Image: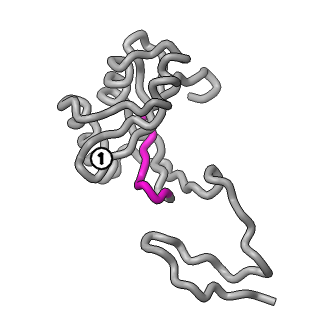
Amino acid sequence: MLVERKTPCRVGCVPRPATTGAMPRTNRVTAMRAIFFDASNREVKRTIDKLRRLIRDQEYDISIHANEEMSRDELISIDIENAVLTGRITKRFTKEARGTRYEVTGQALDGRPVAVICRILGNSWLRIVTVFALEDDQL
């Protein structure tokens, strides 16, 4: 027997298809939708330009989690700035209540590849959510 979803979705929610019985719970990782970007996309260009402007204007903050990850990978804030200023958007995570997150892949000052996960907040402020140095097999 198929069960239709009777309650309306919240804003931005994708309606679930009819199922047989109860909906299985999914963890956050499988529920997120990552979109891989083509660098020629106009929206991508506008977004990376905005991220770079926020970094240049020092209108960003680094979360506690990102700071801990930076310590583990021996990165400093200048490495993160350089990664965003010279890098490119590789993924966009859109299925989150707090807003879209972007993965920017670039280089630290010492040449190591770095991934920066960030989000543009409503007040045009950039939040660095997490940071990690990429290994050779992650490139």
Identify the residue at horizontal 41%, vertical 27% (top origin): 106
Pick whichever, 101 or 44, lies toward us. Answer: 101
| In the image: residue 54, left or right of residue 2 | left
Report helix, strand or loop for mark 1.
helix
Instruction: Tell me residue 28's x, y (percent).
Output: 62, 53
Q: Residues within 10 Å of mark 1 (few under 14, many from 20)?
A: some
Horizontal and vertical percent position of residue 46: 26, 48
Q: Say left or right for 57 vs 65.
A: left
Identify the coloring. Answer: one colour
Q: Is residue 132 left or right of residue 137?
A: left
138 left or right of 105 in image: right
At x 34%, y 51%, the residue is 41
Amino acid type of the residue that numbered disc 1 sits on in the rendered structure: Thr
The residue that label 1 is drawn on is 47
**Residue at the extreme left:** 57
Residue 135: image quadrant is top right
Q: Which residues are magenta?
A: 96-104
Task: State the residue at coordinates (33%, 22%).
Answer: 82
